[in-house]
Each structure stands twice: as C-alpha cells, then as structure tokens.
Image: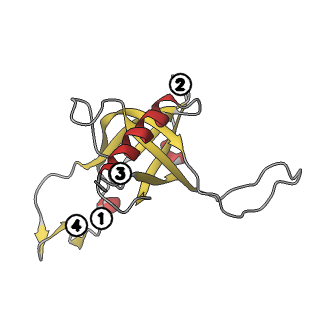
Amino acid sequence: MLNNVPGAVNRMTRNIVINHPNTWECQVFRKTVNRVGESMSGGMPTLGGVGVMSADDEEDVSFELVGIGYALQAEMFSASSMMDRQDANNGFAGEFRFLIEPEAPTGMPGNFTIKKRDVFYLVISDDVKLAFEIVDVETVINIPPFAMRYVANRRGDLDI
C-alpha cells in the first residue's frame, strides 16, 4: 500500500513537468570515451601510463544523444542575497535543480534513464541551446520507486 504513494507522485510529477508553462524541451546526451585499446594497470584503465581517475581525465570523448524530454527548473528555496532593486534574489551561482521527464513514458521505446555526468540542453530555439551537466541525483521520497530531482551545473563551454 505504501509503495503506491511514490508511484502516484511520479505519475503526477510527469504530468506537471510535461504540461507546465515554464517547461523547456531538452535533449539529453551521454559522454562516451573514444579511446581504443584496453590498456590496464592494476585493473584500472590507463592513459599514457597514468591511471585514469574518471572519464573527465580522457581527452578523446564524444557525446551521444540518449533521448528527448522535458525539463522544469525546481529550485529549493533558501536564503540568498537580494538584487540592488530588492525585487528578486540572486540565487546560488552555478547549481540548479531540475525535474526531467523523457518524452516517451516508462516502458515505451524512446524512454531513458538519466545518470550522473549526463549533459542536457535546454532548447530555447533552433539556434540557442543552454548546456547543463547532471552532478547529483536527489530524491524527495525515501520509498522506491524514488521521485528523482537532478542537480545540475551550467556548462557554458558546451552551449550552442
């Protein structure tokens, strides 16, 4: 009975994200390493004789489209500095929270799961896309299936 609650919350969240007037279309990409060869040292991949700590250490990477979806900014409220006109707050620099839903429902072709280090673009127009990288995945309900919220950092270097 209790596990019906998060399922209902996830369905409600999906409906809100897809139909909300402030929702943006988004494109989710996953980084893949293009390095050829399986050089290993002590069970860990190497790059020029040096142990690779993460995919961020790799030079030759590409981004593959995982899927299309919808993103709604979902900031937690916390105290922050006010603008000089005192009509809005500045928020936190560099950290954003989003609710992201794939265009296709769960179990259908085109559905995907978002992971840490995925990069997504908020599609502002055909020519303008803002890049964000998922740095953490949070939940607000501690019962599976979890209701996910994604913590993202701006990636201005990847903007289109």
Secondary structure at numbered mark 1: loop
The reply, left or right, for residue 156 in relation to residue 10 is right
Distance from the alpha carbon under mark 4 to that under mark 2: 38 Å
Which numbered disc, 3 or 2, marks the residue that appears first in the sequence?
3
Q: Nearer the viewer, mark 3 or mark 2?
A: 3
Q: Which mark is residue 127?
A: 2
Secondary structure at numbered mark 3: helix
Secondary structure at numbered mark 4: loop
Distance from the alpha carbon under mark 3 to that under mark 2: 38 Å
Q: Nearer the viewer, mark 3 or mark 4?
A: 3
**Which residue corresponds to the image point at 44% horizontal and 52% vertical from the top-left?**
149
**Which residue corresponds to the image point at 36% horizontal and 44% vertical from the top-left?**
8
Q: Amino acid at mark 3?
A: Pro
Q: Nearer the viewer, mark 1 or mark 4?
A: 1
Q: Nearer the viewer, mark 4 or mark 2?
A: 2
Q: Which mark is residue 6?
A: 3
The residue that mark 1 highlights is 54
